[in-house]
């Protein structure tokens, strides 16, 4: 009896003196990545999956070495709903603040996803001195320009994926090629009525005119629009050869189906064309999405051999989630975790100033090329060569597959025209 | 010519969105704010029958329409009947149900852009030189047929006449032995089936997304407010007014004003003639 009591006492003492403090230590050794994402949308859930894959891989290898002690990453996601029509920006700001105050996020990763919300969140990040790495959505050049303009205030803000300026450049590289090959000269622009798309449409129009293109029309559709017939007919009437689409709303699938059914003799060339980015697009449109081109911002979001890591990531993602990398925020979200780990380990601390300094020195060969940040604007440095910088990726749907057609350094095919366009 | 063709298509679609809402309100004076959610739900039900259970497309459609009708009737029978006559509570309760359906679908994994229904007929034709796909032609044909059948149903069948009686004067109808609650639950069932029919016709043009539930509700309300709450034929006329106004706006003002048209129509109607084109609500106040 006495022995039994002693045993119980021993167990209790063990719990009090060893297990409880140990769990306390373990609890302290977690680096919380707060992810404000619009999780009901592609650009939200693809980022979440990218983060979780990277975190699982890193934690499985022992975590992050912070000044000699190993710490684990932990992902905390809050739905910002900022990609949903009619949801005010303040919702996204509340989500960011909740991640910082309630979830005790050490870093903010991913979003907010909509440009308007991300710009509005910048002062908040500055107030709480929280480093943020944008990985999805947000294409507005205003983000990096704001960092460059007021560095001391907004030095906490980084973006690891391409911005609209890069996307425009990549598109024109293709347009020029099409102009040369098929003598295309007429461009029609269709955009969604949201900040980045409106801005991009304006830039596209200006640049196209300067480059000698005949801009046959610019149509801005409100989020949730369900009929695009008049714009498509206008494009047809004006003998447009390329329809440039900036639209991430689900209804863009209607636009592409209408284009196919109406046999509009113009190539749909999109950016942030979420509907066409997903691997399920082919089945969803019953093959009517064939020939659609879209810019998926960075390599790794479609199959290619940009770097030795690209297909490793692609396969790991497919294995873990049962679906291929889907949207434009997938590879960038995955890489952001590795880049952050790299910076923390070099800094040997979670101190924001030290980590910022190390993030600025980042030079890592990742899934979509060499990753470095511009030290002034904190924008990832783009390139068309993965050895030099972050490469973009433009794909075309061909025979049920997503074929990368740009940049040439990683392309797996060339642009094809629909049969009703061939002269 | 394209304004005429696509104006008609757009108008018929709006009429389809609104008919169910107008029927429920007309008979039971219940603003069914779950209408948009039932529209989306029926799309996902059809999709599930077709893809998860592997049923035939036509059978999936029929079952989905029936299932949506039953769900609508159950919503009335178990929830809305308790708040009937209390306008604010009716709106809040039906909106809450709609919200629960839509967010429940999202929570259940129905998100993304890959949920689609196949078109009934693939391909396109030209109407007076304007290219139109067969599905849209079908939407117009079936839409007109639905309006015609609804007209016949409410004039030549016992249930239809009872529904009309209720819509015209509930107390008089009750005095004639018409069961008010039974008619209200029937109207809710039929209204939900009409929402499902609209979904099954229109959704193959794009994809099934939760967010469209909110848009459909706004469009249905706009059409019914302009046409006169409770007036089925008013809703059809208003659908054509708003439908053509939207297309004309796209052509002459710019596509980004397209969504403003419906909301502006609500505001203008409420300022100029709150009872709408054919509505009786508040008519006395207007006259006074």
Image (cartoon, coloured by chain):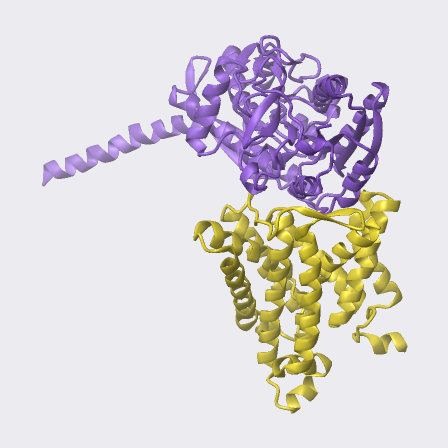
Chain colours: A purple, B yellow
Residue depicted at x 80% and y 61% = B240
Quadrant position of the N terminus of chain A in the picture: top left
On the image, the x and y values in percent for residue A97 come to 62, 35
On the image, the x and y values in percent for residue A327 come to 58, 31
Residue depicted at x 52% and y 68% = B70
Q: Nearer the viewer, residue A415 or A188?
A: A415
Residue depicted at x 64% and y 33% = A113
Residue B34 in sight from this viewpoint: no
Residue A365 in sight from this viewpoint: yes
In-image side of B156 versus A16 (left or right):
right
Q: Nearer the viewer, residue B111 or B195?
A: B195
Instruction: Name the quadrant containing residue A89.
Output: top right
Q: Is residue A166 above or below residue A329?
A: above
Residue depicted at x 79% and y 31% = A240
Q: Nearer the viewer, residue B47 or A369?
A: B47
Quadrant position of the C terminus of chain A in the picture: top right
On the image, the x and y values in percent for residue B85 come to 66, 75
């Amino acid at each position: 009896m006495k022995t039994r009591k002693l045993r119980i006492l021993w167990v209790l003492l063990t719990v009090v003196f060893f297990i409880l403090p140990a769990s306390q230590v373990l609890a302290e050794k977690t680096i919380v990545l707060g992810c404000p994402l619009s999780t009901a949308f592609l650009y939200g859930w693809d980022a979440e999956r990218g983060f979780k894959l990277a975190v699982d891989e890193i934690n499985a290898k022992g975590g992050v070495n912070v000044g000699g002690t190993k710490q684990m990453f932990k992902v905390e996601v809050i739905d910002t709903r900022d990609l949903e029509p009619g949801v005010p920006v303040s919702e996204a700001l509340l989500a960011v603040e909740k991640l910082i105050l309630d979830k005790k996020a050490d870093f903010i990763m991913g979003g907010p996803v909509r440009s308007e919300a991300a710009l509005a969140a910048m002062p908040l990040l500055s107030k709480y001195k929280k480093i943020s790495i944008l990985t999805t959505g947000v294409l507005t050049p205003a983000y990096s320009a704001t960092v460059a303009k007021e560095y001391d205030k907004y030095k906490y803000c980084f973006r690891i994926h391409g911005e609209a300026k890069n996307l425009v450049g990549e598109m024109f590289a293709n347009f020029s090629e099409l102009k040369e090959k098929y003598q295309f000269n007429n461009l029609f622009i269709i955009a969604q009525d949201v900040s980045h798309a409106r801005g991009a449409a304006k830039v596209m129009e200006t640049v196209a005119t300067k480059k000698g293109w005949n801009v046959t029309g610019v149509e801005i559709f409100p989020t949730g629009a369900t009929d695009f017939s008049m714009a498509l007919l206008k494009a047809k009437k004006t003998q447009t050869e390329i329809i440039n689409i900036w639209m991430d709303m689900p209804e863009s699938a209607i636009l592409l189906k209408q284009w196919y059914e109406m046999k509009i003799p113009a190539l749909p060339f999109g950016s942030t064309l979420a509907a066409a980015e997903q691997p399920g697009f082919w089945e969803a449109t019953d093959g009517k999405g064939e020939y659609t081109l879209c810019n998926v911002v960075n390599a790794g979001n479609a199959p290619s051999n940009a770097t030795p890591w690209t297909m490793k990531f692609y396969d790991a993602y497919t294995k873990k989630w049962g679906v291929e990398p889907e949207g434009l925020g997938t590879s960038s979200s995955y890489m952001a975790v590795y880049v952050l780990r790299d910076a923390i380990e070099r800094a040997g601390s979670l101190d924001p100033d030290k980590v910022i300094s190390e993030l600025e020195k980042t030079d890592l060969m990742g899934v979509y090329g060499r990753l470095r940040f511009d030290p002034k604007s904190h924008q990832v440095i783009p390139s068309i060569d993965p050895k030099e910088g972050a490469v973009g990726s433009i794909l075309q749907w061909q025979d049920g597959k997503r074929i990368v057609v740009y940049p040439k350094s990683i392309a797996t095919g060339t642009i094809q025209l629909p049969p009703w366009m061939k002269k | 010519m394209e304004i005429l063709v696509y104006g008609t298509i757009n108008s018929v679609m709006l009429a389809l969105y609104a008919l169910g809402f107008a029927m429920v309100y007309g008979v039971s004076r219940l603003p069914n704010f779950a209408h948009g959610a039932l529209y989306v739900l029926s799309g996902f039900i059809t999709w599930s029958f077709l893809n998860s259970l592997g049923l035939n497309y036509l059978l999936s459609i029929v079952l989905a329409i029936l299932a949506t009708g039953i769900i609508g009737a159950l919503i009335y029978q178990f929830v809305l009947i308790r708040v009937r006559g209390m306008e604010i509570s009716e709106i809040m309760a039906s909106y809450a149900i709609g919200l629960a359906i839509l967010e429940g679908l999202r929570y259940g994994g129905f998100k993304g852009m890959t949920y689609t229904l196949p078109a009934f007929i693939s391909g396109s034709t030209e109407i007076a030189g304007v290219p139109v796909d067969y599905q849209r032609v079908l939407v117009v044909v079936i839409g007109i047929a639905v309006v015609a059948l609804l007209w016949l149903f409410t004039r030549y069948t016992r249930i239809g006449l009872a529904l009309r009686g209720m819509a015209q004067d509930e107390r008089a109808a009750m005095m004639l032995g018409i069961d008010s609650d039974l008619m209200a639950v029937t109207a809710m069932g039929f209204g939900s089936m009409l929402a499902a029919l609209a979904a099954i016709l229109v959704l193959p043009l794009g994809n099934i997304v939760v967010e469209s539930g909110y848009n459909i509700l706004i469009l249905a309300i706009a059409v019914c407010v302009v046409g006169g709450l409770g007036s089925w034929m008013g809703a059809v006329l208003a659908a054509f007014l708003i439908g053509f106004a939207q297309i004309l706006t796209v052509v002459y003002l710019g596509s980004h004003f397209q969504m403003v048209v419906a909301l502006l129509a609500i505001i203008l109607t409420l300022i100029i003639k709150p009872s709408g084109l054919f509505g009786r609500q508040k008519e006395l106040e207007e006259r006074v």
